[in-house]
Amino acid sequence: MGQRPLIKWFEKRQRVAIVEEAIGILEKTGVLIESRQALEMLADRGVRTEKRRAYFSSGQVEEALAAAPDRVTLYGRDGRGEVEIGKENLHFNPGSSAIRILDLEMGESRVPVSGDLVEFAILSDFLSGYSMQSTALVPGDVPENVADSYRLYLALIFSRKPVVTGTFTEEGLTRMLRMLEIAAGGGKQLRDRPMAIFDTCPTAPLTWSALTVNTLLECAGNGLPVQIVPMPLAGATSPATLYGTVVQHCAENLSGIVIYQMAAPGSPVVYGGSPAYFDMRKGTTPVGAVEATIINSAGAEIAAELGIPSHAYMALSDSKSLDYQGGLETAMGAAVAALSGVNNVSGPGMHNFQTVQSMEKLILDNEVCLMAERIRRGIRVDSSEVVADVINEGVTGGSFLTLSHTLKKFREEALFPGTVIDREAGDKRSAPGGEEILKRAGERKREILKAGAPNILTGPRREALKEVVTESAWRAGLKKMPEIEGLEE
Amino acid sequence: MDQFLKKCEDSVLAGDADTAFALASEAIGGEIDILQVIESGFVSGIREVGRLWEEGEYFLPELVMGAEAVKKALSVLEPALAGQELSREVRGVGVIGTVQGDIHDIGKTLVGTMLSASGFEVYDLGTDVSPARFISEAEAREADFIGASALLTTTMPGQRALIEMLAQKGCREDFLVVVGGAPCSEDWAESIGAAGYATDAVAAVELIGRLLDGKGGRTP
């Protein structure tokens, strides 16, 4: 086995210095926490709190890091898809919580509806580049305050893959926990085999809103893993230098890890992020910017140094349509993520500053992710005698195509892209959908969806889930649930 | 005099709030026409900054620092004007803030700074502002407009809640409500009945100016 390729931005002593600087910031500047409950818990555990700020000592950070496991294991519904985030593993999952979906038939983006969530879940379930699904769309046909649990409901029913998710309200979180218990078959089953990981996003600089920190505590109490996803905007809510932002990003992650470990020592947590380099011209937050890619990559290096699994929002674009920019930013991010040892990459399908999802892009990005995984697998080193023999045999025999060595090896060496990738000779385009890649992606989408929902959940668990969402939607003022094909009695 | 005005203008172009403050202090101590210092010095400077920004020469840090320099100068010059029983024309009065449950403030603060530098009187209520607080402050300040910012998809409904509360209290017509923030759009603004939406701080100044002109903004 050859060496797996791995980008390093720092020497060991520099990584250590970054962590020390981050801890120094937590000691001196501290973090703003907008939840009395969290501040009280921290004070009980010996953390210095003053007004609404908490200051963590290096001892407290080190203790939390020692307690945090080096991997997070998630489980799919019905025994499907065990996913280990950590070590040398690389996983991709669709970007989460888009408020719009690109409708290629309309030629523009629109507010997603339940039917889109269903299709999205079926595609995520099918596409092999994604080991997890996510609650990718915020549906517009249910009240906003139940949207978080409603999208989880459809995800759990239409796909068996573990879920990357998050919450919009504290009541929503309670409901989502209840739904996950139902899907897992009980509270103990969910603790033993968590089916979901919750993204919790501190606000840069160094701030935890009440909702995000309470989500952290609630997940800790229920044995659910979390991903800390800081979003520093270099130049606006963090230093303008990449290095400075890497340090602040580290401090924000460490603050989340300490809070979570203090609430439930030994619980699995991921060092994540979705940084951007603030666009000094437009005031926008490009997550597909090359600087964001570098900060994410460096973050994974720091996480590895700490022995904590890593996450990053990469493999996505800021482009408004599925164009050259969309492809280049997505592919560059995915490739760098793979080469940086990021364990869990979120983002595929997304564009336009994390606001728009697209099923066609999800299908194309699936190819990007599979290619990135292939890069990550690296080059397997053959023994020199074998290579010499094979080359000798190929040269003397006049062809390598017919060697038994070729027959034995090519399947494991080469990646065979899907039909959306064009490799026809000359000008011929025989792939379904013809010459336009977006048409080919659309064709592929229809093909996958035509097969229906092979992994749909049936029986009493589905009924119990439906009861939870129907009841909450009723209370939120929705008297009739959206009609969903496949779920009607 | 021309040289003095040029220095005022340059302090804004350099984004040097300390120098702007010093020049403003010098102006009120002398026999200089304060209205002229404001208009031909500092405001002229911020116009030039805006032009350089639109041309791509200046970036946001220069834009914001220029606006901060003007604000600092006005903090000295406006009270002095009042002392002479003069006032400069205020293009409109507004309260701005980030909606309830949302603690993001960079975009909102940019908008506030640009509005202040462009001749509006702006009261920035900060972040996590409830609809009730938006309304009570807008009433207390006799505002023409309310600017509500939201960065999160989860807090956007706060913008609608504000408009609904205005309607409930029967003062929907008293204030123009404008919205902004990354997840917002023209469609969203229209769907909740907001008067307008702007993509960035410069566009927000243009939007509010246009809306108030349409309504015939007020001069205190």
Image: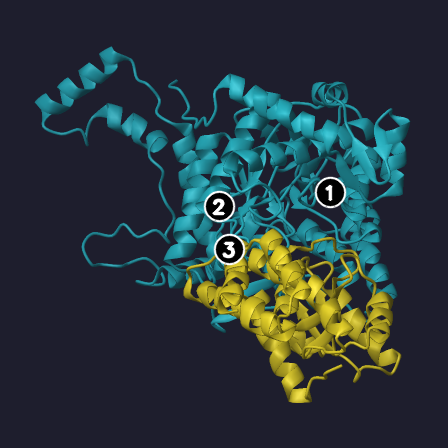
- Which chain letter goes with mark 1? A
Answer above or below: position of A3 versus B51: above
Q: Which chain is yellow?
A: B
Residues at marks 1 and 2, CA–CA distance in whole angstroms: 26 Å
Which amino acid type is marked by label 3? Answer: Ala
Q: Residue at x 83, y 63 (%)?
A: B130
Q: Helix, strand or loop at disc 1?
A: strand
Which amino acid type is marked by label 1? Answer: Thr
Q: Is residue B12 left or right of residue A260?
A: left
For the residue pair A310 and B162, the one nearer the viewer reads as B162
Q: Could you tell me how many numbered marks the image carries?
A: 3
Label 1 environment density (alpha carbons within 10 Å; few <14, some 14–19, many ≥20): many
Which amino acid type is marked by label 2? Answer: Ala
Q: Helix, strand or loop at disc 3?
A: loop
Q: Which chain is cyan?
A: A
Residues at marks 3 and 1, CA–CA distance in whole angstroms: 32 Å
Q: Which residue is mark 1?
A: A207
Number of the label disc, if any, that sits on residue A315: 2
For the residue pair B108 and A110, the one nearer the viewer reads as B108
Q: Is residue B80 left or right of residue B11?
A: right
Do marks 1 and 2 share a subunit? yes
Q: Nearer the viewer, mark 2 or mark 3?
A: 3
Q: Residue A66: x, y in percent? A: 71, 18
Residues at marks 2 and 3, CA–CA distance in whole angstroms: 39 Å
Q: Helix, strand or loop at disc 2?
A: loop
Number of the label disc, if any, that sits on residue B14: 3
- Which chain letter goes with mark 3? B
Answer above or below: position of A350 versus B178: above
Q: Residue A194: x, y in percent? A: 72, 35
Do marks 3 and 1 share a subunit? no
